[in-house]
């Protein structure tokens, strides 16, 4: 467990309620940085560190080690930056957790449901981090909250282009985040809600419905409540999507990170019993460039097929005959209202299943494998609202032979034959 010989070691003594922030260089060849707690107690985004254990962080990691009581830690290797900050909003975040916990206690007493919380704000304000923190604190006091992930660009649960829900049973792993077992995932198909806002709202409602059903049969889930992570798009239809989410999930609390206007708008537009709270962002949250976000998305897809850190997966590559599958895109291009068939609205076109004729342009596209039972026309209706059971990537298309080669986590044959195409592509460089 000793750090690699010759690795630079730097010790930091942290006073109580301060945090050490460090970043690991993003280049793939960058040296990993190891963290070790020597004395005292500390946590990383709500998960406690064990003493004398070395935690490894790979390229691109941006980490904060916070201590309530004071501690000393060692960093091994050369982080891109490392500094201690006294100025953190952690006390406010802890108070937020305490208030939510009060609501859970009350729910338990009165046989009601626990808090449903929506976290909103523009990009790069630390929404995902606040969600992780609140969820980890909740599990640490014995709760079973649900994470609802609505950020289709940077999903913490599944591949990009999806929305999902995950029951949280233990605090996030310091190095790897939450253990993702049996999430409920829906296909959206692109990385911004704006490409099909009707579909986005529809899927939000699907998640809300499934969550409510689970709460009806599972008391712990009901008391635990949920924490909803949203997209950073807070204007126009993006804002309307937040209002829709608040209503369909019947949220009790909205945490607005670092955006006063959004806070005022939500206070104005949401029912008075919804508590809207403005919280500052942490100075440690690092802005991410477009490239950085794209890389993070690619990495998420690579992890899905190949695993990460100690766990390696070995995906399969095989041919699928066009005649064995049905590929759809959700949403037809919008057409002027005057051209719509009688009785049809734009809503219908955005949720419509459009059959895709396989061709070369399918190459590299990520396809969701729908859990909908295979069937003919009549059964098609449920496909949009059906969760997905996995993903494949098209690696080669042979139009002559009418087959496509795919990368798949499971061996052939595909268990389901209804595939939904994403705008998102993945070029397998392995
Ligand atoms: P998005 O725009 O993708 O929705 P976000 O608002 O959810 O972003 P996060 O993903 O929570 O933001 O945070 C952005 C980055 O900043 C992450 O890599 C996270 O690890 C890092 N980060 C968050 N808080 C801190 C902190 N206090 N110190 C150092 N790094 C931090």
Image (cartoon, rainbow, N blue to C red):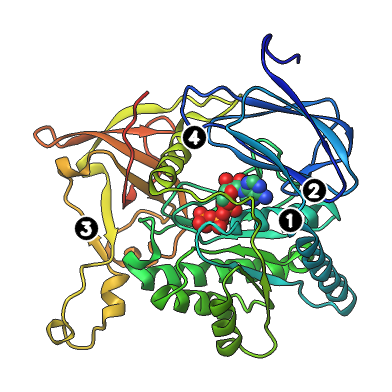
Provide the residue designation for mark 2: 18
Number of the label disc, if any, that sits on residue 303: 4
Distance from Cα at disc 3 to Cα at disc 4: 29 Å
Number of the label disc, if any, that sits on residue 355: 3
Decide which of tag 2 and tag 1 comes sooner along the chain: 2
Q: Residue 198 at x, y = what percent?
A: 37, 73
Q: Quadrant of residue 268?
A: bottom right
Q: Nearer the viewer, mark 4 or mark 2?
A: 2
Circle 1 — which element? loop
Q: Nearer the viewer, mark 1 or mark 4?
A: 1
Provide the residue designation for mark 1: 88
Q: Quadrant of residue 8?
A: top right
Question: 321 and 427: which one is in front?
Answer: 427
Q: Are marks 2 and 1 in contact (CB under 8 Å)?
A: yes
Residue at x 27%, y 46% (from the top left corner): 325
Specify whether residue 51 is in view.
yes
Dot 4 surroundings within 10 Å: few (below 14), some, or many (20 or more)?
A: some
């Amino acid at each position: 467990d000793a750090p690699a010989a010759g690795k630079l070691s730097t010790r930091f003594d942290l006073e109580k309620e301060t945090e050490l922030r460090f970043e690991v260089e993003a280049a793939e060849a960058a040296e990993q940085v190891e963290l070790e707690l020597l004395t005292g107690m500390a946590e990383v985004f709500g998960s406690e560190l064990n003493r004398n254990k070395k935690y490894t962080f790979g390229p691109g990691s941006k980490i904060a080690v916070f201590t309530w009581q004071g501690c000393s830690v060692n960093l091994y290797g050369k982080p891109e930056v490392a500094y201690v900050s006294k100025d953190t909003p952690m006390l406010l975040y802890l108070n937020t957790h305490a208030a939510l916990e009060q609501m859970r206690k009350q729910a338990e007493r009165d046989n009601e449901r626990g808090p449903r919380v929506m976290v909103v704000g523009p990009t790069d304000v630390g929404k995902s981090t606040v969600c992780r923190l609140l969820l980890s604190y909740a599990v640490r006091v014995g709760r079973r909250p649900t994470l609802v992930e609505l950020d289709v660009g940077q999903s913490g649960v599944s591949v990009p282009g999806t929305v999902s829900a995950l029951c949280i049973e233990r605090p996030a792993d310091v190095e790897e985040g939450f253990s993702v077992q049996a999430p409920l995932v829906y296909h959206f198909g692109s990385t911004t809600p704006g490409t099909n806002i009707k579909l986005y709202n529809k899927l939000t409602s699907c998640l809300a419905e499934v969550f409510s059903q689970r709460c009806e049969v599972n008391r712990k889930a009901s008391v635990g409540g949920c924490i909803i992570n949203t997209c950073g798009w807070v204007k126009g239809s993006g804002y309307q999507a937040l209002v829709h989410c608040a209503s369909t999930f019947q949220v009790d609390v909205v945490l607005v990170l670092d955006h006063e206007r959004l806070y005022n708008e939500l206070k104005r537009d949401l029912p008075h019993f919804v508590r809207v709270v403005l919280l500052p962002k942490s100075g440690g949250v690092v802005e991410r460039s477009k490239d950085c976000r794209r890389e993070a998305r690619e990495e998420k897809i690579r992890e899905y097929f190949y695993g990460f850190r100690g766990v390696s997966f070995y995906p399969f590559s095989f041919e699928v005959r066009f005649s064995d599958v049905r590929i759809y895109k959700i949403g037809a291009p919008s057409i002027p209202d005057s051209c719509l068939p009688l009785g049809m609205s734009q809503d219908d076109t955005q949720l419509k299943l459009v059959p895709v004729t396989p061709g070369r342009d399918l190459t590299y596209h990520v396809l969701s494998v729908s859990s909908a039972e295979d069937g003919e026309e009549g059964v098609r209706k449920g496909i949009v609202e059906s969760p997905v059971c996995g993903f494949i990537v098209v690696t080669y298309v042979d139009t002559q032979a009418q087959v496509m080669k795919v990368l798949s986590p499971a061996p052939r044959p595909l268990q389901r034959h209804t595939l939904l195409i994403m705008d998102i592509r993945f070029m397998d460089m392995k």
